[in-house]
Image (cartoon, coloured by chain):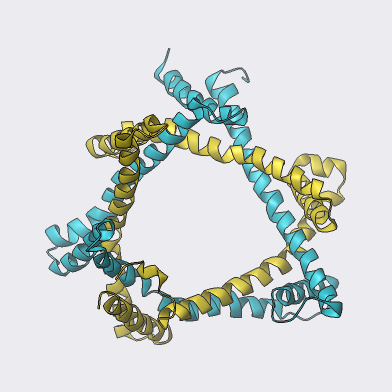
Chain colours: A cyan, B yellow
């Protein structure tokens, strides 16, 4: 019994614990679920310590002697007061400091999501595909315009938008299913090949 | 004042950020670098908030002995053990910390997400039972896209991969573009509401 086999057995046991949910909710699944939450959070703590606390807090203050960093460090520590009744207002300071980036979000979202998309949409309507893309984009935007009742000719136009959206959602759905199926194939391959070795 | 001062900080710094986007001067670049340095120093403390929240929820369950409290003990125990192992032996390749990642965290994460394949299949079945024309169009597009991604699709007909690509390049593009436009306008509107002090829910409740 090698160390690799023991490691694979642990992973296989936990994999089967989670798959057992397909039958019904049971203690094995609940155990694996709780373990997953704990291990995931426990995994993040040392990584944040090594990759964020040491380079951005400890090193600037104690190695580079940049004592100004003490101010944001104290501000960050104010997060803890979120759980107190009388001093919870102090936790607003680290939140609002980060929230100020929305100022940059106004022009950037307008540029990145609106102007760039509009520029890409304004192509010469010289073939069927560009005409379809133009019709689809406009009819979907009309569908989301709720200030006018979707009835009569307007309702028929917005219905074309719904059809375009359904095809778009179908494509996204298909991609999601394929991604999940490939994960499932990966887990079954692990169980049959890496663990049991019956596919070799 | 407990709400007003944070609000003034958001509005003041927010407008400086608006100016920063349009002014490529050195002072503007220096301001952005200063903000980034301070934000990076603040960010690790947010994890403390998450850990404290998790600890408070589960320790309350354990002390009150609510039903299934044993699983809360598993969560807290595994959290403590994993982080302790990370601090004692480090996080490099070949350490017990990486063993935990490779044999516990990663297999369970992949299995959790692969479970969604079954749930999605069940959702598709329910959608198809709805028997509306729109639901049928959705499933037809999904089936063509799925078949277009695997060798079976091209074996059935050479038109399937081509149709799949056409769906992705034309109607899907139109849908994604319209949704992106809507999202962009929504983001701009929400950002403006925060910047002008109309939206204040991020400040939380209380005084």
Quarter residue A187 falls in: top right
| Residue at position x 85%, y 72% in the image | A128
Picture coordinates of residue A58, whole percent (x, y): 18, 56
Picture coordinates of residue B146, whole percent (x, y): 74, 47
| Residue at position x 18%, y 62% in the image | A60
| Residue at position x 74%, y 79% in the image | A123
Task: Name the outermost residue toward the top.
Answer: A1
Q: Is residue A168 left or right of residue B182?
A: right
Residue in the foreground of this view, choosing between A161 and B26? A161
Residue in the foreground of this view, choosing between A88 and B149? A88
Picture coordinates of residue B6, whole percent (x, y): 29, 75
Q: Is residue B20 above or below residue B106?
A: below
Picture coordinates of residue A72, whole percent (x, y): 22, 67
Quarter residue B68 falls in: top left
Q: Is residue B39 left or right of residue B124?
A: left
Q: Is residue A90 above or below residue B147?
A: below
Q: Quadrant of the N terminus of chain B?
A: bottom left
Q: Quadrant of the C terminus of chain B?
A: bottom left
Residue in the foreground of this view, choosing between B169 and A184? A184
Q: Is residue A5 at least partly visible in the picture?
A: yes
């Amino acid at each position: 019994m090698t160390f690799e086999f023991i490691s694979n057995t642990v992973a296989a046991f936990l994999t089967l614990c989670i798959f057992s949910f397909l039958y019904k909710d049971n203690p094995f699944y609940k155990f694996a679920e709780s373990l997953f939450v704990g291990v995931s959070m426990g995994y993040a703590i040392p990584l944040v310590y090594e990759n964020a606390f040491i380079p951005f807090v400890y090193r600037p203050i104690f190695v580079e002697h940049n004592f100004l960093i003490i101010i944001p460090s104290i501000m960050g520590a104010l997060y803890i007061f979120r759980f107190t009744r009388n001093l919870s207002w102090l936790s607003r300071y680290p939140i609002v400091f980060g929230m100020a980036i929305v100022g940059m979000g106004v022009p950037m979202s307008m540029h990145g999501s609106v102007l760039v998309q509009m520029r890409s949409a304004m192509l010469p309507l010289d073939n069927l595909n560009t005409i379809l893309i133009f019709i689809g984009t406009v009819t979907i935007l009309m569908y989301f315009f709720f200030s006018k009742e979707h009835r009569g000719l307007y309702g028929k136009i917005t219905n074309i938008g719904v059809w375009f959206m359904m095809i778009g959602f179908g494509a996204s759905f298909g991609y999601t299913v394929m991604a999940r199926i490939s994960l499932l194939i990966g887990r079954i391959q692990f169980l049959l090949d890496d663990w049991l070795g019956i596919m070799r | 004042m407990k709400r007003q001062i944070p609000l003034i900080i958001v509005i003041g710094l927010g407008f400086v950020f608006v100016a920063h986007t349009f002014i490529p001067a050195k002072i503007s670049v220096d301001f952005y670098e200063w903000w980034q340095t301070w934000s990076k120093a603040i960010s690790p403390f947010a994890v403390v908030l998450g850990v404290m929240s998790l600890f408070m929820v589960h320790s309350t369950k354990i002390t009150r002995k609510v039903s299934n409290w044993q699983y809360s003990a598993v969560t807290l125990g595994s959290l403590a053990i994993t982080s302790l192992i990370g601090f004692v032996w480090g996080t490099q390749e070949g350490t017990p910390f990486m063993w935990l990642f490779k044999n516990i965290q990663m297999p369970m994460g992949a299995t959790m997400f692969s479970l969604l394949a079954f749930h999605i299949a069940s959702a598709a079945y329910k959608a198809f039972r709805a028997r509306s024309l729109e639901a049928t169009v959705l499933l037809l597009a999904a089936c063509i896209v799925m078949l277009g991604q695997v060798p079976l699709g091209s074996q059935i007909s050479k038109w399937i991969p081509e149709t799949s690509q056409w769906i992705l390049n034309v109607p899907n593009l139109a849908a994604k573009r319209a949704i992106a436009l809507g999202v962009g306008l929504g983001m701009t509107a929400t950002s403006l509401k925060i910047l002008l002090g109309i939206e204040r829910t991020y400040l939380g409740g209380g005084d």
